[in-house]
């Protein structure tokens, strides 16, 4: 698994405002959206393209265009919804499939409560969006599900990641699978409630204003 921690002044600025407990939901949503677009630029670095002829007003040349099958964006409900527009802005032709995952806080077992994805993902490049990579269990379950369905490669885009979650993903996921995590920051640790420290709190609540 590759981990890309994006080091960019605009990413750092937006993330710092997101962390601020006094930032209201409306600003949080807007900044999260902008931040995801910046991360998506890096996350799509290996998106499949093929040579394509194009006629300019002056001459014919060969450029590159996205190929089929279309990329698949997978927001993890609920907080991943706050990242959907930010990534589809750069990948408007992508299809969007939804996964709802819930973790039992005691056993850490993850169960799927919603699934709107095609059954066959053979050859598809998948972009999983979930703001917080905390214990890693939700992303592990999502990535394994997509791999089982035939995904060609999987890029997880997160706003914040905990070192514990990254280590668990590295340990539990197939070493031969083509998996990348793109994140705006790797924080210090998880606390006893599995919140990321210093983090930004509950990303779903901050995005949607339900506390
Ligand atoms: N999910 C969140 O929303 N916040 C955390 O800190 C950890 C998981």
Image (cartoon, rainbow, N blue to C red):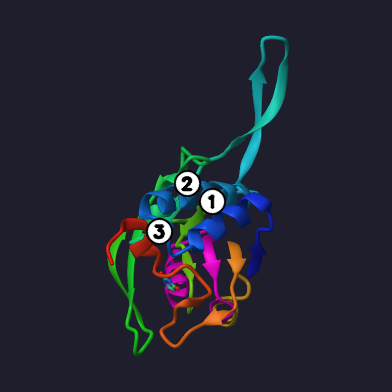
- Residue 157 got which mark? none
Q: CA distance from mark 1 to mark 2?
A: 8 Å
Query: Whole-percent x and y of residue 11?
Result: 61, 53
Q: If you read the primary sequence from the N terminus, does the residue marked by circle 1 or circle 2 appear first?
A: 1
User: In the rendered view of the protein, which quadrant contains the C terminus?
Assistant: bottom left
Query: Whole-percent x and y of residue 154?
Result: 54, 60
Task: Please say if the residues under marks 1 and 2 sit with CB atoms less than 8 Å apart.
Answer: yes
| The magenta stretch spans residue 189 | no
The residue singled out by tag 1 in the image is: 35
Task: Please say if the residues under marks 3 and 1 sit with CB atoms less than 8 Å apart.
Answer: no
Q: CA distance from mark 3 to mark 1?
A: 13 Å
| The magenta stretch spans residue 138 | yes
Q: Which quarter holds ligand 1?
A: bottom left
Q: Quadrant of residue 176?
A: bottom right
The residue singled out by tag 3 in the image is: 80
State which region is magenta. 137-165
**Residue positioned 48% across, 75% down in the render:** 134
Q: If you read the primary sequence from the N terminus, does the residue marked by circle 3 or circle 1 appear first?
A: 1
Q: Is residue 55 above or below residue 199?
A: above
Residue 62 is left or right of residue 82, and the answer is right
Question: Few, some or many C-alpha atoms within 10 Å of disc 2 (few <14, some 14-19, many ≥20)?
Answer: many
Q: Nearer the viewer, mark 1 or mark 2?
A: 1
Task: Please say if the residues under marks 2 and 3 sit with CB atoms less than 8 Å apart.
Answer: no
């Amino acid at each position: 698994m590759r981990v890309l921690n994006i080091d960019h002044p605009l990413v750092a600025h937006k993330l710092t405002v997101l962390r601020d407990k006094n930032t209201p939901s409306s600003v949080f949503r807007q900044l999260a959206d902008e931040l995801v677009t910046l991360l998506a630029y890096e996350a799509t670095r290996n998106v499949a393209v093929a040579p394509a002829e194009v006629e300019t007003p002056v001459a014919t040349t060969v450029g590159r265009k996205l190929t089929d099958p279309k990329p698949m964006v997978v927001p993890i409900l609920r907080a991943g919804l706050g990242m959907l527009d930010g990534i589809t802005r750069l990948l408007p032709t992508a299809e969007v499939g939804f996964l709802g995952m819930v973790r039992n806080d005691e056993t850490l077992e993850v169960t799927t409560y919603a699934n709107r994805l095609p059954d066959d993902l053979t050859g598809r490049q998948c972009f999983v969006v979930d703001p917080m990579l905390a214990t890693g269990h939700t992303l592990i379950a999502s990535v394994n599900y997509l791999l089982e369905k035939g995904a060609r490669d999987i890029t997880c885009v997160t706003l914040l990641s905990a070192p514990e979650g990254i280590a668990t993903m590295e340990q539990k996921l197939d070493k031969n699978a083509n998996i990348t995590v793109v994140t705006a920051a790797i924080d210090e640790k998880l606390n006893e409630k599995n919140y990321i420290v210093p983090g930004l709190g509950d990303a779903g609540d901050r995005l949607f204003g339900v506390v």
